Amino acid sequence: MQFFKNPNFDFQSRRKSAFIISGALIFIGLISLILHGGPKYSIDFLGGLSIRLQFENPVSESSVRNALATVDLGGSEVKTIKEIGSEPDILIRVKQESAQTDAQELVKNAMMEYFPDNDFEVRSVDRVGPRIGSELRANAFLAVLVTLVLILIYLSWRFEFRFGVGAVAALFHDVLITLGIFSILNLEISLAIVAAFLTIVGYSLNDTIVVFDRIRENLKKHSTDPLEHVINLSINETISRTIVTSGTTLLVVLMLFIFGGQVIHDFAFALLIGVVIGTYSSMYIAAPILLEWRKRETLKKKRSRR
């Protein structure tokens, strides 16, 4: 499917403006992170109390949240757990700072008052300490970092080192902007959001490799042409494919965001940001870094000759 017939957009002439916009977004996100004292972590990383209930008659997550709103628990999460051959359970998780000794009693009292005609059973009560939460934070950070390093090694082997640097810089760009937006909106970082970050990395990388592959092919076909022209040509040749891929992905993620429910709302929101930023970065961050790299090499050669 071709959205443009023989497109001839001059992407690289706007690369400095794109660098400024991206730099500003990253800077604002980092300032927000500093002002908030770092990311706002969920119960997954902070630790807390986990209470699993089974009601005689099924209840919705929204009604349980309304019940919890009647008591002072601070931060809490509600999820439905379904197992084959049994009624769905409700899992209530209370943050570490809110998990006082009477938190279990507060939850039970809130449920009894809000659902007076619906008996329930406490299936299990588990407490996750802050030490486990800190280990999860470290492992999550390590997972993202190791992924980026392995991508750099792979792309340096498949293409060239400068291609790998351009791709990894674009991935850092995507993750930092997404993290910054979450900080500005005061949204929590959970294990699901870390999974969304890794999904964004994979999606953005796929789009970047398609562009890089075409650049490598065109470097052979148009070896005498300026690199700026080759990069613009390559992006224009792949832009229809990019629009189709990004558009369909964006549509699916948007449906998840609208109709997926509160449990995956933030996950879908992270992917929405990632799809848009990842598509943008492959054209205005990863590819322009190749051009800037070549210009610096040329400048160094001229200086050495002098």
Image: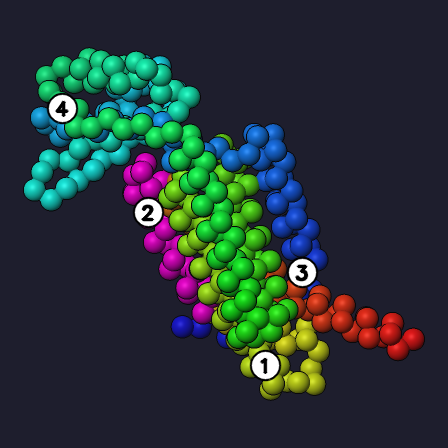
Q: CA distance from mark 4 to mark 3?
A: 60 Å
Majority SS type along the magenta span: helix
Q: Which residue is mark 2?
A: 256
- Nearer the N terminus, badge 4 or badge 3? 3
Q: Disc 1 marks which residue?
A: 218
Residue 276 position within the rendered picture, expressed as x and y whole percent measured from the top left: 49, 53
Sequence-first disc among 1 and 2: 1
Q: CA distance from mark 3 to mark 1?
A: 20 Å
Image side of residue 82 versus residue 6, left or right = left
Mark with earlier residue (4, 1):
4
Q: Earlier in the sequence, mark 2 or mark 3?
A: 3
Q: Position of residue 122 (x, y in %)?
A: 17, 24
Report the amino acid beneath label 3: Arg
Tell me, yes or no, whether the two marked residues, 2 and 3, touch with CB atoms within 8 Å. Answer: no
> Which three-letter amino acid code belongs to the residue tagged 2?
Leu
Mark 3 or mark 1, which has the lower sequence index? 3
Image quadrant where residue 38 sits: top right
The amino acid at mark 1 is Asn
Residue 218 rendering spot, x and y as whole percentages: 59, 81
Quadrant of the snapshot with the C terminus = bottom right
Q: Secondary structure at mark 3?
A: helix
Task: Tell whether 71 sits left or right of 119.
Answer: right
Other-residue count near label 2 (Cα within 10 Å), few / some / many at <14 / 14–19 / ≥20: some
Start and end of the magenta stretch? 241-265
Q: Are marks 1 and 2 in contact (CB under 8 Å)?
A: no
Q: Is residue 56 above or below residue 243?
A: above
Find the distance from the CA under tag 4 to the CA under tag 1. Answer: 66 Å
Q: Position of residue 234 (x, y in %)?
A: 57, 74
Report which residue position mark 3 lands on: 15
Q: Are marks 4 and 1 in contact (CB under 8 Å)?
A: no
Question: Is residue 260 in the magenta section?
Answer: yes
